[in-house]
Amino acid sequence: MFRKSLKTAVCALAAGTALAACGPVQPGAAAIVGHDRISVSKVDSAANQWAKELPHYPQAGQIVAAAKEAQRQQAGQQAGQQQGPYDPSSPQRSVLYKVIQIRLWDEVAREQHVSTAPGQVDAFIASQGGQQSLDAYVVAQGLPTSYDEDYARSVLIQRTMLQRYGVNPDQPVDQQQGQQVLQRLAGDYANAKRHVGITVNPRFGVFDDQTLSLGPVCPHLSTPDSGTPDAAGEIKCQL
């Protein structure tokens, strides 16, 4: 299965490496990543298409249901699941987060000179169980299948970087070595984030520079200090 082969390459990073926001967002934009504008309409369309596709992938549906239950047990807070959509209660937030991740891994590939030619991506998909396996995995992550190639490319980039750092993504690895390699990979990701620059529409949440994760959507963004770090460095909404 495609998902099984990604446990080292993707799940170890999980949602803990995220994004930073700065500056005002353009009207109609969900986010600006470098020179790329991700529109609200694009995010909404992808989320709607994902909702239509989900019933056709029972295994993906089980992963999404489990992620929703885990979120419910944590008082409705987005918990950064290693499997399933980034925010099970908001398909739009999940789509946006994953799309930005894809863009940042492309930047990692550019900076680290990782080749991701279409033929390489196709060969990787075939080696991991083929198109149907990829379809189910991508839907389980909260994206529609139209993002299959983009998502597979981002995973191929991560796997290539892991191999460059001496880790076989398909084999068990010593815990200490694994942590060191993942720290290097997370550093590559954070550098790409810093170089590209990201601006996010507050409608989709606030990015926490302390935890490097996508925080809550603040209902009263005009309230002073709403969505800003408190004394402990945590972002909370002022209600």
Image (tube, grey):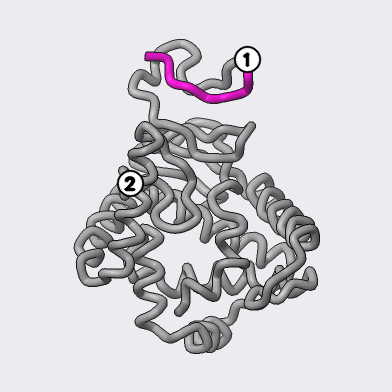
Q: Secondary structure at mark 1?
A: loop
Residue 197 in the image: state x and y as whole percent. 60, 44
Q: CA distance from mark 1 to mark 2?
A: 31 Å
Amino acid type shown at disc 2: Glu
Q: Is residue 13 above or below residue 155?
A: above
- Please say whether residue 19 is one of the residues in the magenta stretch: no
Q: Is residue 86 above or below residue 12?
A: above
* Residue identifier under label 2: 69
Q: Which mark is residue 186?
A: none
Judge the density around disc 1: few (<14), some (14-19), many (≥20) Cα neighbours within 10 Å.
Answer: few
Q: Looking at this view, is 58 or 96 the one in front?
A: 58
The residues colored magenta run 232-239
Amino acid type shown at disc 1: Ala
- Quarter holding the C terminus is top left
* Residue identifier under label 1: 231
Decide whether the magenta segment is chiefly helix, strand or loop.
loop
Residue 98 in the image: state x and y as whole percent. 46, 55
Discs 1/2, front: 2
